[in-house]
Amino acid sequence: MSTDTVTGPGRRRFLTGLPALAAAAALPGCGTAQDSATTRPRSQPAPAPASSAPRQRTRPLFLGTYTSAEGGGSGIGLATYDERTGRITGTGVVEGVADPSYLAAHPSGHTLYAVNERENGSVTAVRIAEGGTADVLGSRPTGGAAPCHLSVHPSGRWLLSADYGSGTVAVHPLEASGALGGRTDKVSHDSPPPGPGQDGPHAHQIVTSPDGGHVLAVDLGTDTVYTYRLDTGAGTLHEVSRATVRPGAGPRHLSFHPSGRYAYLANELDNTVQVCAYDPATGRLRPAAPQPTGTGPGINHPAQLVVTGDGRYAYLANRGHDSLTRYAVEAGGSRLRLLDTVPAGGEFPRHIALSPPGGLLFAANQRSGTVTVFHVDRRTGGLRPAGPAFRSPVAVCALPL
C-alpha cells in the first residue's frame, strides 16, 4: 500500500497521464520547521549560513516523494542533517525524476538510485558530486508496472527492483560511472495464486541477504517471500526457495539481523510481524508464528522494519496508528519482544531509516508531508524526538547517508 489514495488494503493507484515535470521548478514546502523553504536550481548547493559558531558535523539526506500526487514534490529532495542534534536543513532538489517513491545508494556513496513509480515503470540513476550537487545520469525501464522498491547488490554491479503493479522483479547492470545498463532479467511471480482479496502478485521489496549469496523478493499479493540466486556474470535470477505465510497476511518488508541468520517480516494486511530463520547455505526462509505490533484494535498497516547495527533492537513503522514500535531482539536474533510504541510525530509513517552511525532514526510521514527525527538511546533502544518536524511534500522515503 504505497499511496494514501487507495481502494482497499494493498491496492495501489498508478500514477500516470500527468504533465511532465518542469525542468527548473523548485521543490515546494521543503525546509525546516523553523525556516522557510530552501531551494536551488539543479546541481547548485545552497550556500552555508554565515556563523561564528563551531562547524557542525553534517551528513547528506535524500528525500523521496510522489511528483504526480496533489501537493507532491518536483523531484528528489536534497538535505543535510546534523549528527548531534538531528536537525534537517533543505538544500535543493534534483529535478526531472518522476515519482521517486523509494531511494537507494550505491555502496561507494557516489550514486543514488530511484524508482519511478508509474504504470510504465523505470529506475533512475543520479550522480552525487562533492559539495552536495547532483545530476541525473539517465533512466531505464523495468519492464513492469509501478516499481516501489530497489536495492543495490553488495558487489555494486547490479541494481535490483520490485514492481508492485505487475508482480515482477528486475535486474539492471551498473556501469563504473554508476549509470544503468539495459535490463538483464525480469521474473514474474506467477505462483502461488493471489491471496484473499488480491487481484494478482504485488512485489513489494527485493533485497540481498547479508552474506551476499541470495536475493529475496517479498510479494504482498501472493503472501510469499521468494529466494533467488543471482548469476553475477549474466545478471539473471534463479529461484531456489520460497516461503509462504498465512493467506491474507500481505508481507511487505523484510529486514535482516546483523548475524545473517534471522530476518523480520512486516505483514501489511494482517498487522503482524514474524521472525524468520534464514539458512545462508540454501537460501531457505522459515517464518515463525505471527506477533502483534502493539497498536491494539483499529486499522493499521505496518510498513518499514529496521534493525540496529548491534542487533539489539528493531523498530516498525505503523501507518494508521501513526506510531513506531520498539522491539528487543533476544536469543541471538531468534526472538522479538514487544517493548512499546511511541508517536511517529506525523501522519502515515511510510518509511523509516537509521543514520549510518546509528544515533538517529528518521520517519517519512506521507500524509502530513513531514520527516521526523528521533534520538536512539544505544543502551535501551528508546526513542526521543530530536526537535520539530521537517516539512517535505508527500514524504514517502528518507535516506540518510
Image (cartoon, rainbow, N blue to C red):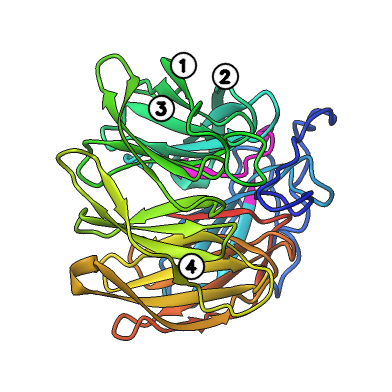
Bounds of the magenta span?
A: 92-104
Residue type at mark 3 is Gly
Q: Nearer the viewer, residue 226 or 146?
A: 226
Q: CA distance from mark 2 to mark 1?
A: 8 Å
* Badge number at residue 178: 3
Foreground disc of the pair 2, 1: 2
Foreground disc of the pair 3, 2: 2
Residue position marked by numbered label 1 in the rendering: 183
If you read the primary sequence from the N terminus, does the residue marked by circle 2 or circle 4 appear first? Answer: 2
User: Based on the displayed image, in which of its 4 quarters is residue 107 positioned?
Assistant: top left
**127 up-or-down from 377: above or below:** above
Figure label count: 4
Residue position marked by numbered label 4 in the rendering: 316
Q: Residue at x 75, y 40 (%)?
A: 13
Residue type at mark 4 is Leu
Location of residue 206 in the rendering, given as x and y in whole percent from the top left corner: 43, 39
Q: Residue at x 21, y 53 (%)?
A: 260
Q: CA distance from mark 4 to mark 3?
A: 31 Å
Q: CA distance from mark 3 to mark 1?
A: 15 Å
**Mark 3 element type:** loop
Q: Residue at x 64, y 67 (%)?
A: 300
Q: Mark 2 near mark 1, Cβ–Cβ under 8 Å?
A: yes
Residue type at mark 2 is Gly
**Mark 1 element type:** loop
If you read the primary sequence from the N terminus, does the residue marked by circle 3 or circle 1 appear first? Answer: 3
Q: CA distance from mark 3 to mark 2?
A: 20 Å
**Mark 4 element type:** strand
> In the image, is residue 26 part of the stretch drawn in magenta?
no
